[in-house]
Amino acid sequence: MAEQLYLDFDNCASVKIRFSAETTVDDVCRVVAESFLEGFSAEQLMLLTKSGEVLSKRQRSLRSLQISGNQRLQVKEITALLYLDFENRPSVAIPLLAETSIEDVYRIVADSFLSGFSAEQLMLLTKSGEVLSNHQRSLNSLNITDNQRLLVLLSRRIPVIGSPAWLREESMGDIYPISWHPALIGRPGHIRDRELLAANLEWLPNGRTISRNHALIVERSGAFYIYHLPGERNITKVNGVQMVSDVPMRLRHNDEILLGEMGIAVRFLRYRTAETVVFEPTST
């Protein structure tokens, strides 16, 4: 049985069309182009729900996308064509609006091209290697324009599940939340490691004296451990004790960490909550 669908446009009156259970998103775009928007092709149009969600799976039926009778959709002209480069599959092009948020881009990529992965498991990078981490910003506000390329990587961040932890740089007082692990301390380095960089100390007066991948913090069963990473100028001390590579040290609240030849000091801070109990390892 055919049902009605209402289409809203930016510069002309709304219209209603009839659709069946098999009608696809691409079918609607084609009908709109042929019947209501002279001079446009279906490929130049996209559909959005009332909440602003882009219907990016153009070969899916409206019914499978839970678009029911008497629902309203917005018709928009595509203003940006982005090219996505993957590690282990061919590149693809996706049509978007300039005002599309980074959060929506992540969702569209996960839903349309990476079955089995969620948006939270992905990382998008510009050609220069900048991670698109501000999910509320639009493509336009970040100067991501038509025909630009983005690199899609699977994220290696694991969310921290215990009580909150931070690093405080002692000379300036800046705070670096440890929101994921492994959490890297150092400077921007290889493009694949940048998403793990939790404490970028390059901007400090002696920041370039530490290694790009200097030290690593991980969480295990609610406790935090720091690893010293080998490097030419890489020295890491915890409370005055120099670390050796691949031998972790347990971090506790207010521990002092010294990094590099110049001894850049950061302090590990952790405040327990009433709901969180951190278990100390037992000795035998």
Image (cartoon, grey):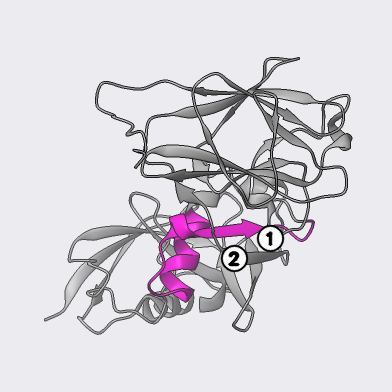
Q: With respect to residue 57, does 223 lie above or below?
A: above
Left or right, 94 with respect to 148, comes to left
Residue 2 position within the rendered picture, expressed as x and y whole percent measured from the top left: 16, 79
- Badge 1: how crowded within 10 Å, few (<14), some, or many (20+)? some
Looking at the image, which residue is at 33% across and 51% down?
50
Q: Is residue 239 left or right of residue 171?
A: left
On residue 192, which mark appears?
Answer: 1
Left or right of residue 222, residue 72 in this image: left
183 in relation to 100, above or below: above
Q: Amino acid type of disc 2? A: Leu
> Closest to the observer: 207 or 282?
282
Q: Could you say where residue 181 lies in the image, as x and y percent from the top left? A: 52, 46
SS for callout 2: strand
For the point 59% across and 65% down, which residue is it? 153
**Residue 80: quarter of image:** bottom right
In the depicted structure, whether residue 56 falls above or below residue 88? above
| First reached walking from the N terminus: tag 2 or tag 1 | 2
The N terminus lies in which quarter of the figure? bottom left
Q: Is residue 125 magenta?
A: yes
In whole angstroms, how far apart are the C-alphas of marks 2 and 1?
8 Å
- Give coordinates of residue 174: x percent, y percent: 67, 20
Magenta range is 104-128
Q: Circle 2 is placed at which residue position?
A: 153
Contact between labelled residues 1 and 2, with CB atoms less than 8 Å apart: yes
